[in-house]
């Protein structure tokens, strides 16, 4: 089946008891056994739940993986991947990463015993050089497009280099969604999502997921899913799966709106830089064109002025809500310096290109002309 068909039907078999087209949400915390150890695949809801199993089946299908483990948030999913390693193991982080991922690595897992090194840029060579600084490199962790600079990394190239050294490649695919990009088909071993974002799509549920190309690679993570208990509730799973049904049509509109807005902003004198991989001049455009179906719904800009200018701009938008998160039907703006990347030291942020005049826009599904009017009045 093609993508849009799978997004609607994977994990969504009619209820065998009633014939309900949409399976009932299973809220039971425990499951009756015919005798000790004799059950129908479910024992206790932390370990497994029919509604969660349906979501996991759907997400594995969309990412073209063999297995999926759903979590209570994107960071819970991320933490499970890192926790599956051992003290002394090394993680190579991409040049530009979500601030919460950096905080988790540096303030939770480095003290616990992981070694961490960051690539100097988005190239495969840079990841390889970072690996040479670690005693026991195990994982390369990428975002492409990255948060918030929308840098593009060649997944196939990094995967080939990492596999030659015995490392796994993990791609946070939240910004692209599986509709635009499927890293497992490009050689990645694991994909991580904040299902809060495009997969849920309506800013009303928090969740995360890890999907594996090979089921065996997910086993230590699935063990942690049960052992540490960071699982989503059945209603959360239902909301994500309901959102997934419209993922394809939503992403088409997100991308069309973002391309139009990026093009308009690039001609406005108040904006000094527009970061969007859909531009031919973007340094990662050719890679993005090869490994993505379209260029995404995120646009990052630098304003002419300083941090005070950027903060004033965010506060004066009316349709764009100044809010954390992204990927919902409504448009959002974020100021990375004090919002998504506040946990990164200012000098480190600046060295990575996250300047005080940087604003990240999540382009929603509103009429694009209304969004342009809102941006224009705020800039004016």
Image (cartoon, rainbow, N blue to C red):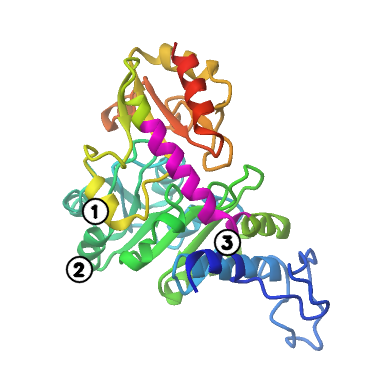
Q: Residues within 10 Å of mark 3 (few under 14, many from 20)?
A: many
Asked whether 153 falls inside the magenta stretch, the response is: no
| Residue 344 seen | no
List x then y, in percent, for residue 313.
Answer: 47, 16
Marks 2 and 1 sit apart, C-alpha to C-alpha, by 16 Å
Compared to residue 36, the image places residue 208 above or below, namely: above
Residue behind mark 3 = 70
Mark 1: which secondary structure?
A: loop
**Foreground residue among 259 and 75:** 259
Compared to residue 41, the image places residue 61 above or below, namely: above
- Residue numbers of the magenta segment: 243-262
Count every numbered label the image shows and give the total.
3
Please report contact status of discs 3 and 2: CB closer than 8 Å, yes or no.
Answer: no
Does the magenta stretch mainly form a helix, a strand or a loop? helix
Q: Quadrant of residue 318?
A: top right
Q: Earlier in the sequence, mark 3 or mark 2?
A: 3
The residue positioned 45% from the left and 65% from the top of the image is: 63
Residue behind mark 1 = 134
List x then y, in percent, for residue 272.
Answer: 29, 20
Q: Quadrant of the C terminus?
A: top left
Which circle marks residue 164 in the picture? Answer: 2
Please report contact status of discs 3 and 1: CB closer than 8 Å, yes or no.
Answer: no
Q: In the figure, is residue 117 to the left or right of 108?
A: left
């Amino acid at each position: 089946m093609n993508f849009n068909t799978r997004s609607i039907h994977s994990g969504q078999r009619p209820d065998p008891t009633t014939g309900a087209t949409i399976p009932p949400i299973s809220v039971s915390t425990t499951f009756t056994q015919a005798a000790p150890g004799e059950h129908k695949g479910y024992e206790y809801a932390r370990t497994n739940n029919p509604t969660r199993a349906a979501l996991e089946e759907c997400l594995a299908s969309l990412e073209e993986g063999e297995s999926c483990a759903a979590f209570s948030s994107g960071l819970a999913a991320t933490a499970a991947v890192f926790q599956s390693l051992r003290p002394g193991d090394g993680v190579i982080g991409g040049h530009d990463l979500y601030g919460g991922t950096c905080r988790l690595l540096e303030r939770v897992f480095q003290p616990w015993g992981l070694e961490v090194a960051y690539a100097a840029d988005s190239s495969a060579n840079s990841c390889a050089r970072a690996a040479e600084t670690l005693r026991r490199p195990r994982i390369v962790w990428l975002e492409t497009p990255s948060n918030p600079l929308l840098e593009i990394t060649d997944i196939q190239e990094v995967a080939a280099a990492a596999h030659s050294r015995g490392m796994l490649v993990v791609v946070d695919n939240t910004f692209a969604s599986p509709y635009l990009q499927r890293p497992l088909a490009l050689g990645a071993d694991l994909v991580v999502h904040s299902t809060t974002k495009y997969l849920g799509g309506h800013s009303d549920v928090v969740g995360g997921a890890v999907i594996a190309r090979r089921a065996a690679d997910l086993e230590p993570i699935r063990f942690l899913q049960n052992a540490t208990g960071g699982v989503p509730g059945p209603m959360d799973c239902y909301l994500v799966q309901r959102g997934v049904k419209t993922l394809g049509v939503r992403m088409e509109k997100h991308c069309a709106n973002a391309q139009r807005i990026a093009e308009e902003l690039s001609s406005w004198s108040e904006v000094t830089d527009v970061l969007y991989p859909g531009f031919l001049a973007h340094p990662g455009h050719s890679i993005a064109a090869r490994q993505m179906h379209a260029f995404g719904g995120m646009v990052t800009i630098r304003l002419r002025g300083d941090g005070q200018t950027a903060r004033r701009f965010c506060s004066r938008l009316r349709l764009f809500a100044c809010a954390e998160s992204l990927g919902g039907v409504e448009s959002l703006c974020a100021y990375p310096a004090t919002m998504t990347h506040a946990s990164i030291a200012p000098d480190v942020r600046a060295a990575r290109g996250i300047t005080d005049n940087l604003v990240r826009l999540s382009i929603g599904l509103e009429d694009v002309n209304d969004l342009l009017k809102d941006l224009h009045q705020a800039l004016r």
